[in-house]
Image (spheres, rainbow, N blue to C red):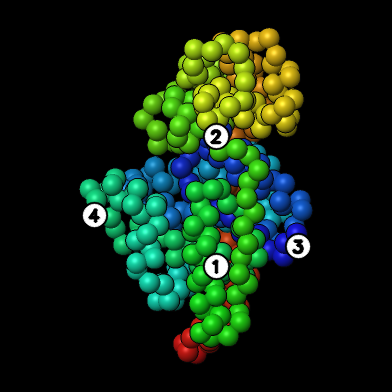
Amino acid sequence: MVMDRIFSGIQPTGVPHLGNYLGAIQNWVNLQEECSSVLYSIMDMHSLTMPKDPAVLRQNILDTTAAILACGIDPKKCFFFRQSLVPEHAELAWILGCLTNVPRLLRLPQWKMKRACQNNEGTVGLLTYPVLQAADILLYKSTHVPVGEDQVLHLELAQDIAQHFNKKYGEFFPVPKAILSTTKKIKSLRDPTVKMSKSDPQKLATVNIADSPDEIVLKFRKAVTDFTSEVTYDPASRPGVSNLVSIHAAVTGLSIKEVLHQSAGLDTAHYKIVVAESVIQKFAPIRNEIKKLQEDTSYLIKVLEDGAEKAKELAAPIYQEVRRLVGFQ
């Protein structure tokens, strides 16, 4: 697959969790080695779709930045920047929003799900943020976007918007293609029928990559499984144990089959500790690096600002051509 330009982003929710790392960040690190033009963004504008305390948001931006760098993202190998420092994102989103019909946005599952958190009213930002996502991608003429299963519909919207723009104004935007994660979706340790989430009210449900070894062991010890002690992989009938197997495979780089072979003869209680130790070993150097980076706020800010300057240089001529095409100049 020829990848001319890759774009992806992450919302600043603080230090990412295990699911974020295995589902997205680990892939980001690999992609920066494989493609010569890669952009990764801290999506602070998107974070405003749900209420945020300004001081918490500022700290979350720094903590997320520290974590992304600690995981192996290298600003010399990619453009790593904060979304709101490049105003062309919002300006292009307005133009693209004028090409997008409201019924299409109302059908997106994230709108239906998240507006329930806003007394079933929902803000304009919550409704239209998929258009901003499209602008994030198209602003750089990105050709590929790493996505999880839950973002496929949003990428399809970006594809449709690109095609609509091209039909109206002439061929201009590439139609971006998905790079689907090969990692199985990581589930909550307390309810393996739902994905792991930072907003989960159950503190034992989510493993953060900066958790201490004791915290990680406790969370895996308390992980919900079932009454069968054997370690098997059957997501439909044994979601809890299968989630542990998926995590074990992902952090070790082994296949599901290899993990099951290694775990033959273990009961689930002992297996939980094996998985916990694998996670601890994987995240120990990352956790130490996060702590070091969090102590150097000025460096984190500089990385994001320098990245934004490079992103602006890339975005400016593309956006100026959009302005010309739509008749602004």
- Disc nearer the start of the sequence (3/4): 3
**Residue named by callout 2:** 186
Q: Position of residue 192 (x, y in %)?
A: 47, 28
Residue displayed at 61% across by 25% down: 233
Relative image position of residue 96 (x, y in whole percent)? 45, 73
Alpha carbon distance from label 3 to label 4: 43 Å
Residue for badge 4: 121
What amino acid type should be assigned to the residue bearing mark 4? Glu
Disc 3 marks a residue whose amino acid type is Val
What is the secondary structure assignment of the residue under circle 2? loop
Q: Which residue is mark 1?
A: 159
Q: How many numbered circles are shown?
A: 4
Q: Taking the image as drawn, is residue 137 in sight?
A: yes
Which residue in the structure is indicated by mark 3?
Answer: 2
Instruction: Look at the picture and state if 24 lies above or below 92.
Output: above
What amino acid is labelled 2 in the image?
Answer: Ile
Q: Earlier in the sequence, mark 3 or mark 1?
A: 3
The Cα atoms of the two marked residues, 3 and 2, are separated by: 28 Å
